[in-house]
Image (cartoon, rainbow, N blue to C red):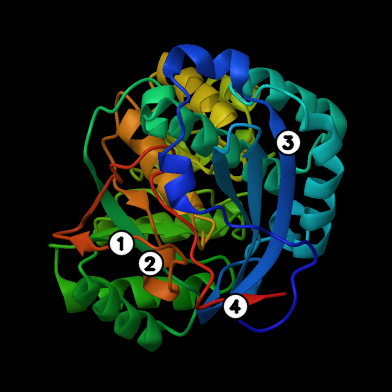
Amino acid sequence: MDGTPSNNVRVPDSRKESSSKVTRKEVSCLLKITKIDVTPVRVPMRTFADAYASYSSGEFALVTIETDEGVTGYGECPSTVIVGFYGETLETVVGTVKSLAPVLIGEDPTNIGVLVSKMNVARGDSFIAKTGVNLALYDLVGKALRIPASTLLGGRRRDRIRAASEIGITSAEKMVTEARRLADLGFGVIKLKAGRDMMEEMKGLKGIRNALGTDVELRVDPNAGWSRRDSLDAAKVMTRCEVSYLEQPLPGWDLEGLSMIRKKTEIPIMVDESVWNPHDVVSVATAGAADLINIKITKTGGLTTALEVYNTARAFGIPCVIGTELESSVALGAKLQIGAALEDLPYACEYTELAFQRIVVKERIKLRHGYLEVPKGDGLGLTPRFDPVERR
């Protein structure tokens, strides 16, 4: 392993954890957080571009939470897609997690909602850092109770989830090549990233549809990079290409524009940048701005608020998907766990990370017939692996 971590992260022996004598009844009165560590990590990655930036390496911060009973939880702060979208960097994420440690040490980790509130007061909009801590809490509590995190989120409703992947922004010709690669990997749902050159992007869309036929579901996501006019013009092409939905063509604040596009086109509209919390869902629904919502667990600061967003959307009759932030490690397990717990999940969820980088976990992750199996282990169900990665 290259480099030296900023903190010394001790990976507890799994035999120690599995031999813990803590019972379910005793957990709430016995567990106490004793230590929180964070390590920045970089992993190799195929180049990927969206309307914000281009990414050539995967980055994340691994959060480790230890307790006085030897039960340890792991969380991931996905930090590949950062500055343009979140205003955070890997370095600031590490610093924020360190600043949260004194707030949480000595607390009962089973009081996840209470600890989320404490983090919100302490660090406000530090979504990426709070995500890693939140996921580590769910992993820890699930292990302590010997249940998967999906049970903590309401119960496991499905054992597998249909998977989608994305194509980064590139030339129309290369889009077709990438689409073929994803189809060969087993993805039956492909989303084109857009938002820089609408005409070239629509040329690529037509090329992909001609190359792959109608067996593959297609989606388009300009990441708020188009104008209203471009969106209306592109919608005509997307209708002919049988695109399932158009995601966030306009800035997150332009609910009026999104509502107008939704009324004037036949393409369902999904929002991403417009929704960060349950209050945003109410605003979007009231404005009639969306048919679907993309929930990203990093954007919500973890699983707790993500579930609140889903339940609010469901109250308005708006279906959701679980989106991607190019997660690199145990956050993939978190996405699968919440996907397993949601009452309705009619659309494929996004696992682009599987097509662009190696997932740094001990367990084998395999796409089978377009679906991913939900991990059956306790907590998030995945264990971080350090061997093939570079600590920053």
Q: Nearer the viewer, mark 1 or mark 2?
A: 1
Q: Would residue 233 be visible to someone looking at this image? A: yes
How many neighbours does mark 4 have within 10 angstroms: few (below 14), some (14-19), or many (20 or more)?
some
Q: Of the residues tagged 2 and 3, which is closer to the observer?
A: 3
In space, the residues marked 2 and 3 are separated at their CA atoms by 34 Å
| Quarter of the image that includes the C terminus | bottom right
Alpha carbons under labels 2 and 4: distance apart:
14 Å
Give the crowd class for mark 3: few <14, some 14-19, many >=20 residues within 10 Å: some
Dot 2 or dot 3: first in sequence order is 3
Tell me where residue 315 appears, x and y as whole percent. 43, 14
As measured in the structure, the alpha-carbon distance from the residue carrying label 4 to the one carrying label 3 is 33 Å
Give the secondary structure at mark 1. loop
Marks 1 and 2: CB-CB under 8 Å? yes
Instruction: In the rendered structure, find residue 144 and report the number of the disc placed on it.
Output: none
Q: Say which mark, if any, is on residue 365.
A: 1
> Is 85 rendered above or below residue 16?
below
